[in-house]
Amino acid sequence: MTMSHSGGRRRPPTIHDVAREAGVSRGTVSRVLNGGHYVSPAAQEAVNAAIRRTGYVVNRHARSLITGRSDSIGFLLTEPQERFFEDPNFNVLLRGCTQALAAHDIPLLLMLAGTEDERRRITRYITAGHVDGVLLVSSHSGDPVAEQLREAGVPLVMCGKPIGVGSKVSYVAADDRDGARDMVRHLVSLGRRRVGVVTGPLDTPGGVERLAGYREVLAEAGIAYDERLVVPGDYSRASGEAGAELLLSRVPDLDAVFVASDLMAQGVLTALHRAGREVPRDVAVGGFDDSPAAVASTPALTTIRQPWDRISSEMVRVLLAQIGGDDQSAVILPTELVRRGST
Amino acid sequence: MTMSHSGGRRRPPTIHDVAREAGVSRGTVSRVLNGGHYVSPAAQEAVNAAIRRTGYVVNRHARSLITGRSDSIGFLLTEPQERFFEDPNFNVLLRGCTQALAAHDIPLLLMLAGTEDERRRITRYITAGHVDGVLLVSSHSGDPVAEQLREAGVPLVMCGKPIGVGSKVSYVAADDRDGARDMVRHLVSLGRRRVGVVTGPLDTPGGVERLAGYREVLAEAGIAYDERLVVPGDYSRASGEAGAELLLSRVPDLDAVFVASDLMAQGVLTALHRAGREVPRDVAVGGFDDSPAAVASTPALTTIRQPWDRISSEMVRVLLAQIGGDDQSAVILPTELVRRGST
DNA sequence: CATGCTTCTGTGAGCGTTCACAGTAGAGAA
DNA sequence: TTCTCTACTGTGAACGCTCACAGAAGCATG
C-alpha cells in the first residue's frame, strides 16, 4: 500500500517510478503503455500493477515532444459564432465530437475564429502542429481557412459540403437533397399541389440542395414549377415569418409549405396563424432539422431529422483515418422524415 | 526572403533555427519569447525579425515539459449534458470562456463527464497536470468532482454558487436573490398583490435564492406569504405549464407570476392562454435568464438578465489569478431587469 | 557446437524548450 | 589600476518520454 496522492500539488509519478516499482526498465513500461507488443505476460502484469499502485498517468507533453503528435484535435468554428451558438444542432455536433474523441482518449480543443486576427492566430497554432487534425464547421462559402489548412497538410474534416468545388477537402454531411425530396414527396402524397418553399441561404450548399430536392419532386409529380412559390430565407425565425407572408400575398390558396429549417418554420406557423390559416387543414407545413423547436411549436412540426449524432461520430472517424493515412473524401448520411402534427 | 512553409507537412522551425537566423543563442531567443527582460534592443529586434522570417511558433509541449505548466485549461461539465447543451446560457458561457482565454493565448479543452467512468478518466487527466486549471459547470449539489479537484490542489472556479457549504471553492455567480427581488418588486409596483411563483429546483442554490428573493420582497411589501402561491419547477417548459395550472386551480384570481426561468415562463404563458387569461392584463408574468426564448414568446417576456458575458470573463480572470497564486473565493455579479410585453 | 530465428529486455540518445549558472563587456567608484 | 556593479549573452543540464539498437535468452536447425 503506497500513500495516496491527495493533498497539495505533488510531482506526479513518472515512467521511471513505475519501472522501479515494477522491477523492469523504462522501455518495458513504455511498451506496455503503447499496446504491449513484445512484452512477457509477467512483465505486463507487473507494470499494470505498478501503474495502479502509483496512480501513474502518462505525461502527454513528453510523449508529444518525441512522437511529433499532439494527441489532441481542434474543433474549429470560423465566422458567425452567434448564429451557430444559438443553433441546437451545433451543440449536438460539438457534444458528439467531444464524446467520440473521448472514446479514443483524445482531448478536444475548442477554437473560435470570429475575427481576422483570431483566424490568423489559430491558423498558426494549428499549422505549428499543436493539434493532429481539425474538425471544421464553416457554413460560409469559400472559407480560406479550409484551403490554408489543407495546403499546410493538416488533416481536416468539414461538417457539411464545402462550396468551393475545386478543393479536395473531406467532409461529412446529411443528404440535404434527399431529405428535401422526402418531405416534398410527403406533402404531395397528402394531395397538396400548391406547395410553397422558404429556402435557406442560397450561397450555402444546404440551401441549394434543399431547393433542388424540392424542384426534383415537383417535376417527378408533374407539377409545374412556379417561381411565385419560391421565397428566400436565411434560416432565422423572422425570415420564415416574412417568407410566409410573401407567399400568402402571392398565392393565397397555397396548401403546403416546405420550409428549409425548423426555426423558419416556426415563423411560418406564426404568420399562417395570424392570416387565419389553420395548420395542417388549410396549409401543411414541413420543416427541416428536427430541432427542439420542432416539438415546441404548435402544432408540432413534421420535419426532416438530420443524424447529428452519426455526423459527429463519422467526422471523428474520418479524421482519425486521415491522420492514420487513409484518405476518404466524403460521407453522406441519410436523413429521416419525422411526422408530427403540422402535416 | 526564405521560402514560405506551404506544401506538405514540414518540420516546423525550432528555437535553434531562429537563433541561428538571428545570430544569437537559444537562451536569448527564449528570453525574447518570455517577456524580453535582459535583452538588448538590437538582439530583441534581430530575434523578432528572425521569428517573422522563419514563421516560428513555440513548441508548447517542449515548454510544458520543463515548466510543468500546460498553458491550457479545461472547461468541465459534469452531469446532465442534455439539459445544459440545450440551455442557450451554457453556450454563451462556453463561448465567453473560450474567447477570454484566447485573449491570453490559452487553449480551452472541452471535457464532458457524463458517466462515472468518464468522471474518473477526466479527474485522472486533470490531476495528472494536463491542464493548469478548471472551469467547472455543475448545477448539481455536492459534486464530488469539485472536492476531489480541490483536494488535489487543482485551481478551480465554478459557475454558480456550489451547494456544499463547507468547501472553499471559488465561484462566480449572478446575484440570483437580488434579481428575484427586482422582478418581484417590479410586479408589486404594478399593483399586483396575488403574486405566484414557479420555483427552480430547490436542491440548487439558484432555485433556493430566487425563492428567497421572492419571499423577502413580499415581506417588505407587507404581503402575507401564502403557500398556495408557491409551486415547484425544474426549469423545463413542461414544468412551467404544469405549475401554472396548479396555481390557477389553487388561486383563480392570481394576478402575477414570477417564474424562475424563461423556459418555464413560456410554459406558463401557454397554460395561461389556454385558461383564458390575458397577459399582462389579467396576469403579469416575469421570467428569469433573458434567453432567446424570452423574445420569442408572445408576449415577449419581462425577465432578469444574467450577465453571462461578464460571468465568463470573471471566471477566467479568477482562475488565472488563482493559478498565479492569488486566491479569491467568490464573485457575485449584478443582474438587470429587462422589461418587455408580459408585465 | 555453431547458427539462425524469435521473443523479450535494457540502454543511450534525443525531441525543443527553459532555467541556473557562468561568463563577458562596459561604466563608474575607490 | 583594480574592484564592483549592472546589463547582457551563451552553455550545459534537465524535463519525461519514445525509439532504435544491442544484447540475452530459449529453441529449433544445420
Image (cartoon, coloured by chain):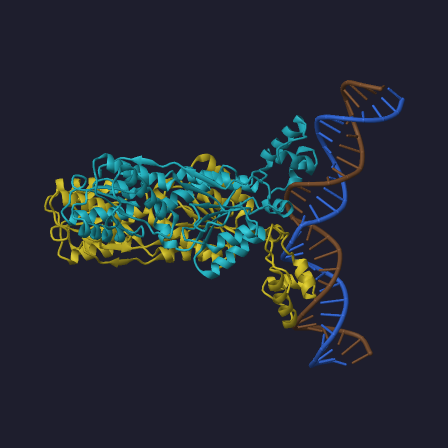
Chain colours: A yellow, B cyan, C brown, D blue
Q: Quadrant of residue A189?
A: bottom left
Q: Position of residue B81 (x, y in %)?
A: 39, 54
Q: Residue at x 56, y 44 (%)?
A: B71
Q: Nearer the viewer, residue B222 or A218?
A: B222
Q: Residue at x 53, y 42 (%)?
A: A125
Observer able to see residue A202:
no
Q: Residue at x 57, y 40 (%)?
A: B324
- The quadrant the N terminus of chain B occupies is top right
Q: Position of residue A208 (x, y in %)?
A: 29, 46
Q: Position of residue B124 (x, y in %)?
A: 54, 56
Is residue B139 rendered to the left or right of residue A274? right
Q: Position of residue B311 (x, y in %)?
A: 42, 39
Q: Nearer the viewer, residue C16 or B190?
A: B190
Q: Nearer the viewer, residue A248 or B244?
A: B244
Count of numbered circles in the view: 0
Q: Quadrant of residue C25?
A: top right
Q: Quadrant of residue A331?
A: bottom left
Q: Where is A124 relative to A71, above or below? A: above
Q: Nearer the viewer, residue A46 or A116?
A: A46
Observer able to see residue B192:
yes
Q: Where is A31 relative to A217, above or below? A: below
Is residue B282 rendered to the left or right of residue B167? left
Is residue C21 rendered to the left or right of residue A82? right
Q: Where is B176 relative to A338, above or below? A: above
